Image (cartoon, grey):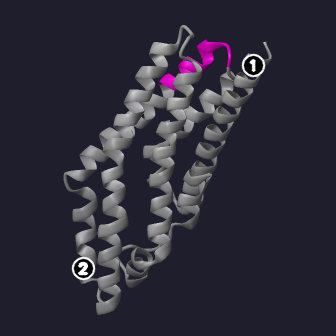
Amino acid sequence: MLFLLYPALRPFSNEASLQGAQAFASPFWVLAHMLAVVGFILLVLGLLGLHSALQTTPVERLVFVALVLTWIGVGFTLPYYGAEIFALHALGQEAVRQQSVALLTLVDAVRFGPAIFVFAVGLLLLAVGPILVAIAVWRSGTLSRWSGMVFALGFALYIPQFFGTQPIRVAHGVLVAVGCIWLAWSMVQGQQQSKAS
C-alpha cells in the first residue's frame, strides 16, 4: 500500500515555478517520499520472508540471489530518495520564503548529478531482483505463479513510470501494491497449506 500512497499523496506541479516550490515545501512531499522509503525497507523484509518460506525448495538459491540483488538495489535507491525528501524540501521552503524561483535551478543539480547513476543502478537491480523472484515463485510450485509475475512487472516498470503523469504513476502504484499484496497473500496461503499437510 505504501507504493500506492507515495504517488497518490506526492504533490505534482510545474517544478520550475513557485507552485513547484510549494510542492517541495509541502509536508505531503516529505510524507509521500518517506512512505516510499518505508515501502522499500518492507520490500526487502518481505523477500527475506519469501526466502525463509522457500528455503528447503529447489529454488532456494534463486530466491537468495533475488533477495541480495533487491537488497543492494534498495541500498542504492534510498540515498536518492533522501535527497528528494530533504534537499528538495529545504530548497522549496527557502524558495517559498523568498518568493523566488531562483533556488529551484538547483533541483536538477540534486536530481541529475552523480546521484542519478547510483539511483539508476539501484532501480535496475530492483527490476532484476523481482524478476528472479517471479521465476522462483513460478518454479516453486508452492505459491501462486501469477503473484510473482505481477510483483515483477510492477518493479520492472519502476523506471518508465517516472516519466509519466500523476495518474500513470498512481496506476503504477496500484500495480506494485497488487503485486506485493498478492505475493504476500500467496506466502500466507502456502504456509497454511504446509501446516495442514
Would residue 3 appear left or right of 69 to someone viewing this image? right
Residue 111 at x, y percent in the picture: 28, 59
- How many residues crowd around disc 2 within 10 Å: few (fewer than 14), some, or many (20 or more)? some
SS label for mark 1 = helix
Residue 31 at x, y percent in the picture: 49, 67
Q: In this view, does 132 lie above or below 151?
A: above
Image quadrant in which you'd find residue 89: bottom left
Q: Is residue 64 visible?
A: yes
> Mark 1 and mark 2: span between their CA atoms?
59 Å
In the rendered image, which quarter contains the C terminus?
top right
Magenta residues span: 132-142
Would residue 26 appear left or right of 81 to someone viewing this image? right
| Residue in the foreground of this view, choosing between 186 and 148 | 186
Residue 49 at x, y percent in the picture: 55, 30
| Residue in the foreground of this view, choosing between 102 and 37 | 37
Q: Label 1 amino acid?
A: Lys
Q: In this view, does 193 lie above or below 37?
A: above
Pointer 1 residue: 195
Q: Label 2 amino acid?
A: Leu
Which residue is located at x 59 percent, y 22 percent?
53
